Image: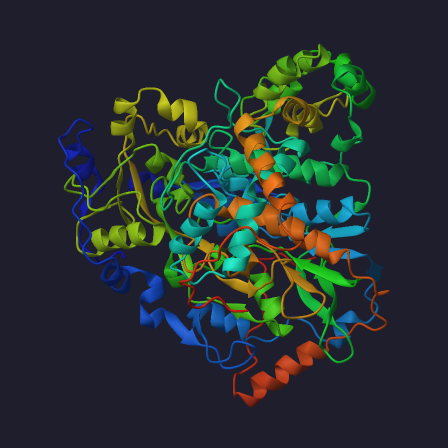
Amino acid sequence: MTNDSDNSQTINLTINGVAVAASAAMTLVEAAWHGGVPRVTAVSCLESVCGSCRVLLRRGKEVTVNLACQTFVEEGIEAVFLPPQVPPLHHYEIGDFTDGWNIQARFHEIFPEASHCRNCHGCVRSCPKGIDVEGAIALAAAGHFRDAGEAFLECVMCELCDSACPELIAPAHVGLFCRRITAHFHLRPPNLIYRLEEQRKEKAGLAAGESHYTISPFVKGGSR
Amino acid sequence: MSMINAMPLAQARALYRPDADIGPPPELADPLALLNAFHPDYVSSSVAKLAVGANAGDNCQRELAELLQAEAIIDEADLAGAPVTDTDVLIIGGGGAGCAAALAAAERGARVLLVTKLRLGDSNTVMAEGGIQVAIEPDDSIQRHIEDTLRGGHDIGNPALVAAMAEDGPDVIRWLIHEGMQFEQEPSGDLCTRRAGGMSAARIVHCRDYTGLEMMRVLREAVIQHRSIEVWEQSPAVELLSNEIGQKCVGAVFKSLADGRFRMVRTHSVILATGGLGRLHLNGFPTSNHLGATGDGLVLAYRMGARLRDLDSFQYHPTGLVYPPHLSGKLVTEGVRAAGAQMLNAAGQRFIDELLPRDIVSAAILRECQEGRGIRVDDGRVGVWLDTPRLERSQPGLLERQFPKLLARARVSGIDPRLDPLLIHPTLHYQNGGVVIDVNGATTVPGLYAVGEVAGGIHGRNRIMGNALLDIISFGRRAGVAATSQRDRGPKKVTLEHVNRARRELTLAGIPLTHEAPQILPDYAAKGIWNR
């Protein structure tokens, strides 16, 4: 499982233009800290779910993107931490939607570019989670919001696909729109609704501010 | 940790059999004795007494006490020429609690400014895997949720806060669904529930093992899209602002990571939603927390005069990864144990009931490691097995179906938990205590609210699974509403009077003003962040 002799091997690379001598098991984030690369503050969860540590990678002529916390150091690689994606140009508030029957029309008003996909695969190639972004956008454009949203289950909102899209579709935000309206319009769990209704009836029988629940007698140290 | 006796990893791996015959774990005769001997909260050398401030005389973890009794980063001279922004409600922190507070305040028509140290959504929320507790099953009740939470917290939680949170539960889920959050459903449409440590009924609702990610990306998007919420990223709070007599919180000062400049914000309501402090690595432990979790909110609130509580109580989650090294301290969700995974020592024996409260399970793992029954990796760190292959054998396909995040993360490192048991060790996970609040999230300082992990009193001395995600939305929304009820026209004057007061107290107590706080980032990640 582990082999520390690998870890003692020195790997030379550059991060944000700074030469760094790292050891083999380091991620690019660890290597940046180890090498004292200044101003690396686009780092947070360190387990590739927050999407902050967007990094551009150059290996010879090949250029790719990834998350720095899940990318290991390689000899000669040039890594550049990317600035955050600019806020989306597409605007909606979920409370604005009152009628599920016109949601396809609303989608195309909000995301008019989604039907302009030219199948360049930039979004697919840039996704650090291996999501079939392009296929999901086609599903969304055809109104299959549930399936499109499901494809984005592992999306970490790094917005690298947004950066990669020449049509400015903002695929990450399309994906999230699809997930959100699926829950907003279709998730109506009977067990939850039953308990909410029970609580509503109980509250109706109580004076304002009164609690239905007994507070346990064994309290020792609750301050206040 | 490196000096203790343990079996080398390769030897333990060779001995391990997913089909070995293993019996039940031994009875735990005396849980308190186990905690006293092995849990860091109970080891006296890790605790100090605070000398100044609202909690003078109280016990506090030593590393935190140093920060609470440190000098401020700024003084009046730093504020000369700093631009001032006015807002109705200022929220400090961009995780789940901060976003819930921002949305609740904005829904009531307030102008909201949310300022966060790193990026919006950078938080512990996004990593939460297990789920949210909400009492919705027919054999469950709000009352039982309250009782389980208080009991899990060793009966010192504030019952009024616990009752408020548990009662909010069903409406919190309704609100999250309204905002567009998905949850796992049964074919009947019911929300799936599962039971975890310390729970008397199945009560955890979830979205695969991505519950926190699903919640955070939905709330983040809702905040970005909201017309009356403005967001400043890369802007750590370095100090709060007080009125002329240092008795009311009227704003905060931020130092931008982008340009190094100070900015002041003036308001009548400040909501602290800054999260916990795992990145202080108390007692040398690894942590599951995100990089920004450095306890800044506790430091700012304490200097402002707010009362804190349970500062000697932290949660060490039993199952932090030991291997691979770059994921050291990162969590394997308790959901895996809830689904039936067992823990084994180097000899392949179970040593504790895996679904006892987290503090007891962690103490038992620390006992195995300290008494020589652990498994050692080459760099000297020690752990025990979490037996995922046996779970996979008993319920084929379960790991892939319910824990895709675990498999995806392991895959990047060339590990398959369906074949290899995971090496785990307790990891600093959660701040049980924090700023004293009432049911509206109001602290003991007028104008200052605290919500989420930075607040205390809900989880007593031990939080049970699924209550953190509920806590942040319940109290985030409560504080967001309460903060908009302030009717005054806002402060005339903003000062650092509270900083001057704190400095006088430190000097009188003979504490040298050599350290500055808040910490903002851990030292290993802070090199050159202000270089221009």
The way the protein has been coloured in the rendering is: rainbow
Q: What residue lies at 54% left-to-right and 76% top-to-bottom?
A: B69
Point out residue B417 in the picture as x, y percentages from the top left corner.
33, 29
Q: What residue lies at 63% left-to-right and 32% top-to-bottom?
A: B177
Point out residue B44 in the picture as x, y percentages from the top left corner.
32, 72
Dividing the picture into quadrants, the one containing residue A91 is top right
Q: How many marks?
A: 0
Quadrant of the drawing holding the N terminus of chain B? bottom left
Q: What residue lies at 72% left-to-right and 79% top-to-bottom?
A: B497
Q: What residue lies at 48% left-to-right and 22% top-to-bottom?
A: B186
Quadrant of the drawing holding the C terminus of chain B? bottom right
Point out residue B216 in the picture as x, y percentages from the top left corner.
60, 39
Of B528 and B523, the residue lying toward us:
B523
Q: Is residue A67 above or below residue B242?
A: above
Is B156 on the left or on the right of B212, as rendered? left
Point out residue B163 in the picture as x, y percentages from the top left corner.
53, 53
Q: Is residue B161 above or below residue B51?
A: above
In the image, farthest residue toward the front: A205
Residue B196 shows in this picture? yes
Is B133 on the left or on the right of A42, as rendered? left
Is A99 on the left or on the right of B409, as rendered? right
Dividing the picture into quadrants, the one containing residue A90 is top right
Of B58 and B259, the residue lying toward us:
B58
Residue B332 shows in this picture? no
